[in-house]
Amino acid sequence: MAKNVVVIGAQWGDEGKGKIVDWLAEQTGGVVRFQGGHNAGHTLVVNGKKTVLRLIPSGILHETLDCFIGSGVVVSPEALLGEIDELNAAGVKNVEGRLKIAPTCPMILPYHIALDQAREASRGSGKIGTTGRGIGPAYEDKVARRSIRIGDLADIDRISDKLKANIDLYNVQLQHLHGTEPVRFDDVMAKIRSFKDRILPMVADVSRTLYEKGQRGERLLFEGAQGTLLDIDYGTYPFVTSSNCLAGAASAGAGVPPQMLDYVLGIVKAYTTRVGSGPFPTELFDDIGAGLAQRGNEFGSVTGRARRCGWFDAAALKRAIQINGISGMCITKLDVMDGIEEIKIGVGYTLADGSTTDILPFGSEAVAGCTPIYETLPGWSESTVGIKSFDALPENAKAYLKRIEEVCGAPIAIVSTGPDRTETILLQHPFN
């Protein structure tokens, strides 16, 4: 029996992880975010009411559940407090009392945002497609060992010395490389003082608390952000995010031993989408692609940017299954495929040199040279919206799902047929 489950995105993000984490959360003693920042948007729909979370784990709507932000996350205190205020206004109980933040989380501060936006503006047509929220520069500081971390809020004098050095470094880049306005030390220090007293009571030894919960036999749910194909090492580099999005990152990002990670649930759309720049082999530029975008409401929950849509890419998913060790898949948005007469599945690629492969290569240059090899399956005209039993699905929908399993080499554990918690088909429970 699996005690702890890791939920990760197995495509380019936006797969619907938030709903599934929220759905599984009530059976756990805590939900942990282990990487990313407030560039992630996790949308929950409960009894028709929509909530968008960016930093706070997707278990927060369960009003007695502990939620944790591990040290693999870069935290914007201002964004975090804004999100807490939104939840408080919506009537969610005791958010600040239930949220625990690792002191080792790097903070995102105004100079990170300024540099992120200045760099994207300077790239012109070569933009990476960042959200401009300072995520990348904050991770750069972490690796360069100059981060100001959440735990530093306990000592303002220590922050002051670090902050001066960081602002001097950033202002050189802002002014001389990008021709933008410098960031003022006094302004940043004032912001830090303004949020310090609200943030500090939420700081806790997340690593130890999670370990002790595990020792007591409590179940834990580890929540990833973005998706495998945006991983800094294994995604379509450089068109990727700045953190490791893989299941293995849950150990380092949450501060728990790998032995505590029992089951990996990969969240997968019934088609494929991508936000921002970068190669996308199965992308559609026709009415079918436009229809997927319209029916799937494919707009970013954080940025509002339109998502690019395409056929299901089984060769890309095969890579994600292998590098994450995916135990089972959750297929989301099956209902968006309703009404398509013929459905294609990308089962491999012809590469630029004329050879073929059945798995996604590494790096944007190699992926850009991939021409998809398709299988065609009959679609279905019946509605699958809200169906809660596999047997009740149209025969062609069942055949489509079974073919995905066969080509990718992993079982489907869950199928989502709508955004609400209840619109879910359970085939194999991750905790059982």
Image (cartoon, helix red, strand yellow):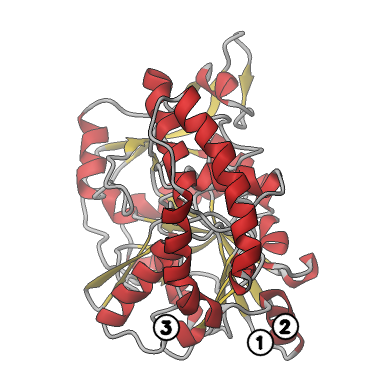
Q: Which residue carries the number 3 mark?
A: 95
Residues packed near mark 3 inside 10 Å, few (<14), some (14 to 19) or many (20 plus): many
Looking at the rendered image, the quarter that the C terminus falls into is: bottom right
Q: Between marks 2 and 1, how big is the CA–CA gap?
A: 5 Å
What residue is rendered at 77% in x and 87% in y? 215
Q: Which residue carries the number 1 mark?
A: 218
Q: Between marks 2 and 3, how big is the CA–CA gap?
A: 23 Å
What residue is rendered at 25% in x and 62% in y? 385
Q: Disc 2 or disc 3, which is closer to the eye? A: 3
Camera-nearest residue between 73 and 382: 73
Q: Disc 3 or disc 1, which is closer to the eye? A: 3
Q: Earlier in the sequence, mark 3 or mark 1?
A: 3
Camera-nearest residue between 36 and 359: 36
Residues packed near mark 1 inside 10 Å, few (<14), some (14 to 19) or many (20 plus): some
Please say whether residue 375 is visible from this viewpoint. no
Q: Amino acid at mark 3?
A: Val
- The kind of secondary structure element at disc 1 is loop
Q: Is residue 364 above or below residue 227?
A: above
Q: Between marks 3 and 1, how big is the CA–CA gap?
A: 21 Å
Q: Is residue 400 left or right of residue 6?
A: left
Q: Amino acid at mark 2?
A: Gly
What residue is rendered at 58% in x and 49% in y? 164
Where residue 195 appears, as percent x and y from the top left, is 44, 71
Where residue 403 appears, as percent x and y from the top left, is 49, 45
Q: Are marks 2 and 3 in contact (CB under 8 Å)?
A: no
Q: Which residue carries the number 2 mark?
A: 214
Residues packed near mark 2 inside 10 Å, few (<14), some (14 to 19) or many (20 plus): some
Q: Earlier in the sequence, mark 2 or mark 3?
A: 3
Q: Is residue 349 above or below residue 54?
A: above
